Image: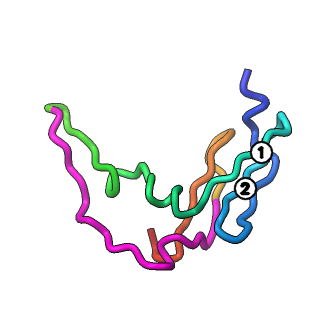
Amino acid sequence: MTDGLAIENYEIVNDLLIVSFADKSESMVPLKLLRERCPCASCEGETDALGNLYKGPEQALNPSSFQISGLQPVGYYGLRPFWKDGH
């Protein structure tokens, strides 16, 4: 069962995303690492049925690229960050 994965609280403190879960565990993720590992199709690319990788142009990062303007819960245990640079 995934009850322990339910997010109870989340907040940005300095340059960290801190997430508290129902099982009382807590995760801290540096915002820089979170942005650098963005899994979206523009950043990581996506493949077609033949295995060809399609990826957006390389995006220049600046200080606002590592600042979150908002977070949106997604499903039962996910969060979607909104970055100040519009990403």
At 52% across and 70% down in the image, what residue appears? 66
At 67% across and 59% down in the image, what residue appears? 17
Q: Is residue 38 magenta?
A: no
Amino acid type for the residue under numbered disc 1: Glu
Which of the marked residues, 2 or 1, is nearer the chain's N terminus? 2
Q: Is residue 64 magenta?
A: yes
Which image quadrant for residue 4?
top right
Residue under circle 2? 18
Circle 2 — which element?
A: strand
Image vertical order of residue 48 relative to residue 62, above or below: above
The image's colour scheme reads rainbow
Asked whether the residues under the numbered discs 2 and 1 touch, taking CB atoms below 8 Å apart as contact, a structural biologist would say yes
- Percent from the top left, x then y, of residue 11? 75, 62
Taking 63 as reference, is 72 left or right?
A: right
The quarter in which the C terminus is drawn is: bottom left
- The part of the chain drawn in magenta is 51-71
Disc number for residue 26: 1
- Percent from the top left, x then y, of residue 85? 46, 76
Taking 50 as reference, is 38 left or right?
A: right
At 32% across and 57% down in the image, what residue appears? 42
